[in-house]
Amino acid sequence: MRRVLIVDDSPMVRKMIKKALAMPDYEIIGEASNGNEAVELFGRLHPDLITMDVTMPVLGGLEASKKILKTDPTAKILLLSAMGDEDLLAQAKEIGIKANARKPFTADELLKAVRSLTGD
């Protein structure tokens, strides 16, 4: 079972992710609405996987991911972005994010992206 931390400032998107991952393979162990919360919860909960929104208040997804990967270079982060910005995706790869999905996504698209990251 993969333990998942969902990070998105939109409660609706968090709900969509929970619904997409509502299966025996995944357990949602926490939710954060900004990057600072994500960094704090990652340190406390040690999830197997993080779904990370790019654009959030307080601390954005790239900055939060940098902090998380600095403390644990093996952290698995799926970056969720509404923007088709190639520069952003290049920055994400540079800091160690290996997978991304574009919003809006279907449950199948999200699962495919998660599985590509976890190797399931």
Image (spheres, rainbow, N blue to C red):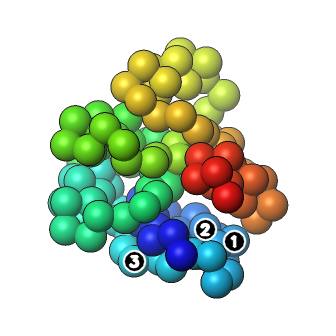
Which residue is at a point 27% across and 70% down the rendered structure image?
A: 45
In terms of secondary structure, where does tag 2 sit?
helix
In terms of secondary structure, where does tag 3 sit?
strand
Disc 3 marks a residue whose amino acid type is Ile
Residue hosting label 3: 29
Residue hosting label 1: 20
Front position in the image: 50 or 72: 72
Residue 11 visible? The answer is: no
Q: Residues within 10 Å of mark 3 (few under 14, many from 20)?
A: some
Front position in the image: 2 or 40: 2
- On screen, residue 51 versus residue 62, left or right, reads right
| CA separation in Å, label 2 and label 3 | 13 Å
User: With respect to residue 67, does 14 lie above or below?
Assistant: below
Contact, mark 2 vs mark 1 (Cβ under 8 Å):
yes
| CA separation in Å, label 3 and label 1 | 15 Å
* Residue 47 position within the rendered picture, expressed as x and y whole percent measured from the top left: 37, 64
User: With respect to residue 19, does 40 lie above or below?
Assistant: above
Which residue is at a point 54% across and 75% down the rendered structure image?
A: 1
Q: Residues within 10 Å of mark 1 (few under 14, many from 20)?
A: some
Disc 1 marks a residue whose amino acid type is Ala
Number of marks: 3
Front tag of 2 and 3: 3
Looking at the figure, which quarter contains the C terminus? bottom right
- On screen, residue 86 versus residue 76, left or right, reads right
Query: Which label number is shown at residue 89?
Result: none
Which residue is at a point 52% across and 43% down the rendered structure image?
A: 79
Query: Which label number is shown at residue 17?
Result: 2
Indicate the quadrant where residue 66 lies.
top left
